[in-house]
């Protein structure tokens, strides 16, 4: 019975963690801490190598998202203030998209928010519609790649947590 409860809790932790990540919240951190908690507080034998691997997957997802979000659009030679505006637009879009259409809306809303923020700011600053559209399209692509990398890490962490509890 105890093993069944651990299995259910690990699956719920994985679902919650992935959901939090999709909503642009710290889901990967939640899953990393859940994995450590299961390893330390239950009778599952977990190797240090396994915990190191989980930690590296977590770090890879976080570094990928941060690097893509901040430096991906920077290659278009935009200012750091523009990067900040795009990040705020992506966050607002995620929040709005979540309210309109939970889960998938969070993802799409973040893309649209980054696109609108980049277009509006660049057009306001330069008055060039083609350049503003180009920068906005690049911002949406970078946001997509950043989110895709972090969500991929979230799925890997969720499956690893469930595997650790169910099969070990």
Image (cartoon, helix red, strand yellow):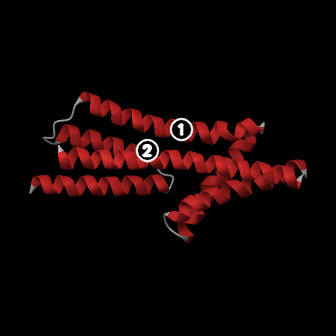
Residue at the farthest bottom position: 100
Q: Residue 73, percent across and down?
A: 70, 41
Residue at the farthest right position: 127
Labels 1 & 2 near each other (Cβ < 8 A) = yes
In the picture, measured across the screen, residue 115 lies left or right of residue 131, that is left
- Tag 2 secondary structure: helix
Residue sitting at x 70%, y 48%: 139
User: Could you say which is closer to the camera, residue 152 or residue 23?
Assistant: 152
Q: Which residue is mark 1?
A: 64
Q: Residues within 10 Å of mark 2 (few under 14, many from 20)?
A: many
In the picture, measured across the screen, residue 2 lies left or right of residue 18, that is left
Q: Residue 29, percent across and down?
A: 40, 43
Q: Quadrant of residue 80?
A: top right
Q: Residue 47, percent across and down?
A: 22, 31
Residue sitting at x 33%, y 30%: 52
Q: Residue 150, percent across and down?
A: 49, 45
Depicted 28 relative to depicted 94: above or below: above
In the picture, measured across the screen, residue 33 lies left or right of residue 137, that is left
Q: Residues within 10 Å of mark 1 (few under 14, many from 20)?
A: some
Depicted 118 relative to depicted 44: above or below: below
Residue sitting at x 55%, y 58%: 107
3D distance between C-alphas at marks 1 and 2: 10 Å
* Quadrant in which the C terminus appears: top left
Among numbered discs 1 and 2, the one appearing first in the sequence = 1
In the picture, measured across the screen, residue 51 lies left or right of residue 107, that is left
Q: Which residue is mark 2?
A: 153
- Tag 1 secondary structure: helix
User: Could you say which is closer to the camera, residue 155 or residue 62?
Assistant: 155
């Amino acid at each position: 019975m105890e093993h069944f409860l651990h299995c259910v809790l690990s699956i719920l932790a994985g679902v919650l963690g992935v959901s939090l990540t999709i909503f642009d919240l710290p889901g990967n951190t939640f899953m990393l801490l859940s994995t450590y908690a299961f390893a330390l507080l239950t009778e599952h034998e977990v190797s240090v190598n396994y915990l190191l691997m989980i930690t590296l997957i977590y770090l890879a997802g976080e570094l990928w998202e941060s690097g893509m979000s901040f430096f991906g659009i920077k290659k278009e030679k935009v200012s750091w203030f523009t990067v900040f505006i795009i990040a705020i637009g992506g966050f607002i879009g995620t929040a709005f998209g979540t309210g309109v259409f939970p889960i998938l809306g969070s993802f799409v809303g973040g893309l649209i928010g980054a696109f609108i923020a980049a277009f509006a700011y660049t057009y306001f600053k330069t008055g060039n519609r083609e350049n503003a559209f180009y920068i906005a399209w690049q911002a949406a692509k970078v946001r997509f790649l950043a989110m895709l990398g972090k969500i991929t890490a979230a799925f890997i962490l969720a499956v690893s947590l469930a595997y650790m509890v169910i099969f070990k």
